[in-house]
Amino acid sequence: MPTLGSTLSTSTIREVLTANRTYYVRTDGNDSNTGLVNNSGGAFLTIQKAVDVTSTLDVSTFTVTIQVADGTYVANLVTLKNAVGSGEVVIQGNSSTPDNVVIDGGFVKSSAGTVYTVKDCLIKKNLGNAIIAIDSLNSAKIQFSNVNFNTGLSYHVRAFGGGFITATGNYKISGGATFHSISAYTGVVNVQAMTVTVTGTPAFSYFCYAARFSVQTWEGSSFSGSATGTRYLADLNSVIWCAGGATFFPGDVSGTTLTGGQYN
């Protein structure tokens, strides 16, 4: 029994990884499973459960892979959480046929810490309530590759408040949105030396929009296919760097700069 004036304290003992780890997510899984076996009796049902379990670990320097099986996941908004350690977390679908893994929702990270990569999947809004596919806030870092940005979303990628989003591989756009890429309040979007495939002539209000001291770098990237809408807007002392001329971004309306914005 504690004595008068003593303090009760509790501590959480974290598992420390000594090797890379994979958690499995399947449409026939169950969130009461361990997530460590790739069958219906071992896999998780939701991506969020796999993220929640990962956040309880000390990942040390290792990588945690959340392997998502083919199927449709009404994820709404998956909150990406920090683990202890410098290792990264990869949320991965089907590398050869990414459209087989459908995320009906989006991903958000709102604090600095563990770096997440989202790859090999199609992201859209249908039954889910998320309006942003990949959302990085408050100095968080998210990477993505081999993603198909599909229909129903308002923003495809958004970096706010020092959030940092980087494309680490080629990707596809098959649905329109208000913005494909938006940054503000010192947010950074980095899509360098990537091939972006645009299909179906999607419509955007602005394909690329940078505002309030933010930066977007697109140098060396290229687009196949076409879109409609305004190509870009650089506003409020922000910079869009592409080194590709006025028609670099997809769209059928010329881009513009306002209030100290720069486009190069």
Image: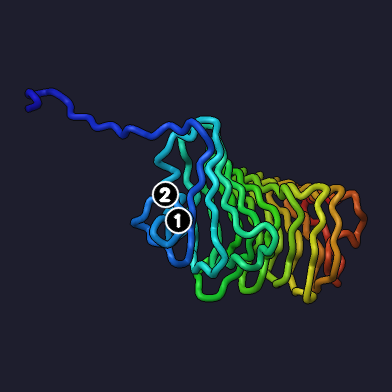
Q: Callout 1 environment at 10 Å: few (<14), some (14 to 19), or many (20+)?
A: many
Disc marking residue 52: 2
The answer to whether residue 138 is visible is no
Placement of 75 over or under 49, stated as above or below: below
Left/right placement of residue 52 relative to residue 150 reads left
| Percent position of residue 175, x then y | 70, 72
Q: Residue furthest toward the right? A: 245
Q: Residues within 10 Å of mark 2 (few under 14, many from 20)?
A: some
Q: Nearer the viewer, residue 132 or 257?
A: 132
Identify the secondary structure beneath mark 2: helix
On the picture, is 69 further left or further right than 119?
left
State if disc 1 and disc 2 touch (CB < 8 Å).
yes
Tell me the quarter of the image containing the N terminus: top left
Residue 68 in the figure: left or right of residue 11: right
Q: Which residue is mark 1?
A: 48
Could you say where residue 14 lies in the image, as x and y percent from the top left? 37, 34
* Numbered label attached to residue 116: none
Mark count: 2
* Residue ID at (62%, 43%): 162
Quadrant of residue 257 within the rendered picture: bottom right
What amino acid does circle 1 point to?
Gln
The percent position of residue 92, horizontal first and vertical second, equals 59, 54
Residue 48 appears in the figure:
yes
Residue occupying the point 55% across, 75% down: 126
Query: What's the residue type where badge 2 is placed?
Result: Asp
Q: Quadrant of residue 255?
A: bottom right
Provide the secondary structure element on which disc 1 rests.
Answer: helix
Residue at screen point 81% across, 52% down: 194
Residue 107, placed above or below residue 19: below
Q: Position of residue 244 (x, y in %)?
A: 91, 53
